[in-house]
Image (cartoon, grey):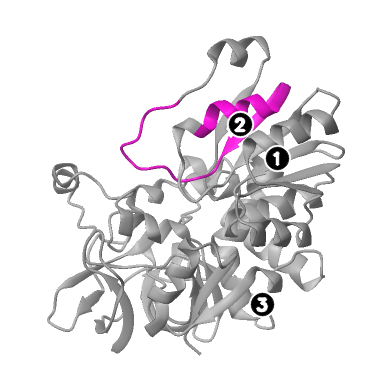
Amino acid sequence: MKTQAAILWGQGEEWSVEDIELDAPKAGEVLLELVGSGLCHSDEHMVTGDMVMDPDTAAELGVAQFPLIGGHEGAGVVMEVGPGVTGLEVGDHVVLGFIPACGNCPSCASGMSNLCDLGAFLLAGRQVTDLTARHHSHDGTDLGIMCCIGTFGKHTVCSAASCIKIDKDIPLDKAALVGCGVTTGWGSATYAAEVQSGETVVIVGCGGVGMNAVQGAAMAGAAHVVAVDPIEFKREQAQVFGATHTAASLEEATEMVGELTRGAMANKAIITVGEGDGTLIAPTMAIIGKGGRVVHTSVAPIMDTDVSMSLFDLTLMQKQLVGSIFGSANPRYDIPRLLRMYQEGTLKLDELLTKTYDLEDINVGYQAMRDGENIRGMVKYK
């Protein structure tokens, strides 16, 4: 079938909205009509090259990262199911989890489906079912898809392992947000950081993920939630999601936390900046006290290995530095759970969407993200 999608033809280029040809789903796959897609910073990492593999490494692995249909935060309606698909049928509403969950690998079986073995193919740009393409340009060129789903298209074909069925009375545009940013931020606070009632928590970076880390920490009962961001608009919005205090820099936050805790410092800190940087680790580790934990959720450049921190402080103060993908949450459990919380009025989703864009204006939306004008922008298809 013919549809439209936003294609990134190479590193450093703009998204190009074009007509594409979409194959029918094969075994284990579904065809979806999407309602829209969140404009997440992870797709920007493909533009800047932060998540682009070395060409020789990519060739060895058989990976073709470009051209690529972006998008990994979407929701839609099942139009067709391929052979062997169970649990989904035409007309079902689904959220796409950006990490497929097979349910059978050791990680899934041990309750860590955010680390599913199928995640090895997230940057491969092909179907996880057989590593071939279903998406093609007008001249027949195979197109990759971001995180095995490619939600910057009005329709997509993907593995059923990426689809989480939801109730039909949930607005699909809001449900799409739970496919990445909401769950990643909320889980970073509630699961990875294990925020407890009465704790002091610092969130470094208040975009789509960070704002939900603020929300998660507040919902977990933190006494102080300190939101750190240089942009005044984001600091103001953080208070809507539960921040008790805000700061424009880590230096300002460190002084503030010292006063709030009488020198004991924070219990937890979560790094959710748009681009991870090793130089952020030391000052963030310094803002936590004895036995504290820093959660690093940000995506850093794929080849960046330089980190600055005090190992002396790490040992003698028994501090922790941990990483987290998808907020250490489980897609099939936590996506429906968070949407129930939204329906019950305890989770804020409506407030996250700053502005929506037509697919043709996707580059406008990403410029707004770079300029700090949106908490979460979204391209909507209907």
Q: N-terminal of the two: label 2 or label 1? A: 1
Q: N-terminal of the two: label 2 or label 3? A: 3
Across and down, in percent, residue 286 comes to: 64, 24
Image position of 40 with respect to 152: above or below: above
Q: N-terminal of the two: label 3 or label 1? A: 3
Q: Secondary structure at mark 2?
A: helix
Q: Nearer the viewer, mark 3 or mark 1?
A: 1
Q: Quadrant of the N terminus?
A: bottom left
| Bounds of the magenta segment | 280-307
Snapshot quadrant of residue 331: bottom right
In 3D space, how far apart are the residues under numbered discs 3 and 1 (Cα atoms)? 34 Å
Residue occupied by mark 1: 202
Q: Are marks 2 and 1 in contact (CB under 8 Å)?
A: yes
Q: Residue at x 33, y 41 (%)?
A: 302
Residue occupied by mark 3: 167
Residue occupied by mark 2: 284
